[in-house]
Image (cartoon, rainbow, N blue to C red):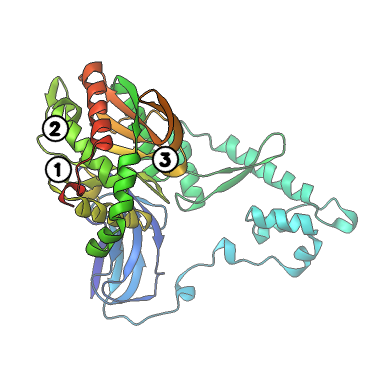
Amino acid sequence: MLIEIKVPALSESVAEATLINWHKRQGDHVERGENLIDIETDKVVLELPAPQSGVLAEIIKGDGATVISGELIARIDTAAKETKATAQQPETAESVTPPADVMQLLMPAARKAAEENNLVAEEIAAIHGTGRGGRITKEDVLDHIKNITTSTSSSQQPDSKTDQVVSTTQTTGTSSSAANQITESGRMEKRIPMTRLRMRIAERLVQSQSTAAILTTFNEVNMQAIMDLRTRYKTSFEKEYGVKLGFTSFFVKAAVAALKKFPIINASVDGNDIIYHEYYDIGIAVASPRGLVVPIIRDADKLSFAEIEKQVADLAKRAQDSKLTIEELTGGTFSITNGGVFGSMLSTPIINPPQSAILGIHATKERPVVENGQIVIRPVNYLALSYDHRIIDGREAVLSLAAIKEALEYPVSPLYEA
């Protein structure tokens, strides 16, 4: 019995996806629930499990293919027996080994250049060696690659930048593959198409810059009280709740306190309307191997310190493993980004649309400050609040950042009832 394998339903905001990597080849046996392929959207990487055990009878869409929700990409035969994939698949260019006599003509530097540029047997055999006794030099290989690049670019001129991306993706096979090329000066370059996530990040950042009137206000906060609280409670906190007490929960709590005082910071623009959100879904920017993602902590105002820390730890781990769901990356009324974990001293964060504000946190460093007419050393963090000046005036922005500062410098103990 043949079972059709289709692209799972994508969210309304996701129009297309890319097939990253088939984990099985045509003719391989698959078990029910075994991951067949990774599917990349502009938000997450989805795993597509096999609905039944059997043999992967046909792969309709290969690595790097662009697909839509519900599109047929493969078939599984539940009654067939496993066959050797090599008998089902045509020999690929990578599997072709150049003849021994050709390999003997390659000088060491030429051999390395040929391997780096993935030259196949036919291409190596076509290279005219200018070295002694017909030996193929590195310059011969580079000249051959340059001629191929020139002839290809002259015969296939894309009509737009989008066509260039599509053409490169089709040539390399997957969106993450690289295409080597030689510049006019003879130096090597590598062209790598953007992933869907990277393209989405670029699109949203440009959208934010072009549609919002972004302005940033700054303040500094004395982190001594927070650091003292963490030192006092971190051992008992971890023992009781099974999670470390970090800084993120303090910033989330402080942000929520400020948003309650100044609801416009938690609002968004929809056409000519302002939408005031009466809930607090806080996005936490996380760096992942695929790029920046912003998972959402829902109803943060109703969560304890322990619940926030557990969610942050879980979301960060699954972001690293590309296990976040589309729902966990959708929505949000306000965002927090922490460049301080990488050592950033100051930045102007870009708003995550359709939100109207974002809080930037930076590295906490010991700095001289004046207290009661005396210069003392305190752990200081510079805060940055970027906001949409179309609906948020400077007064609300400055006061809301001051409210965050106050909540951090004068926190309630013990840990807001944890």
- Which residue is at 54% across, 49% downward? 178
| Residue 358, quarter of the rendered image | top left
Mark 3 to mark 2 CA distance (whole Å): 26 Å
Q: Residue at x 26, y 26 (%)?
A: 402
Which residue lies at the image location 12% right of the left edge and 33% below the top edge?
A: 277
- The Cα atoms of the two marked residues, 1 and 2, are separated by 9 Å
Residue type, numbered disc 2: Lys
Q: Is mark 3 on a helix, strand or loop?
A: helix
User: On residue 340, which mark appears?
Assistant: 3
Q: Between 102 and 22, which is closer to the camera in this rendering?
A: 22
Based on the displayed image, in which of its 4 quarters is residue 109 positioned? bottom right
Q: In the depicted view, which residue is nearer to us: 418 or 198?
A: 418
Q: Do the residues labelled 1 and 2 touch (CB within 8 Å)?
A: yes
Q: For the N terminus, which image quadrant?
A: bottom left
User: What mark, if any, has residue 301 been given in the picture?
Assistant: 1
Residue 301 in sight here = yes
Residue 42 visible from this viewpoint: no
Residue 418 falls left or right of residue 229: left
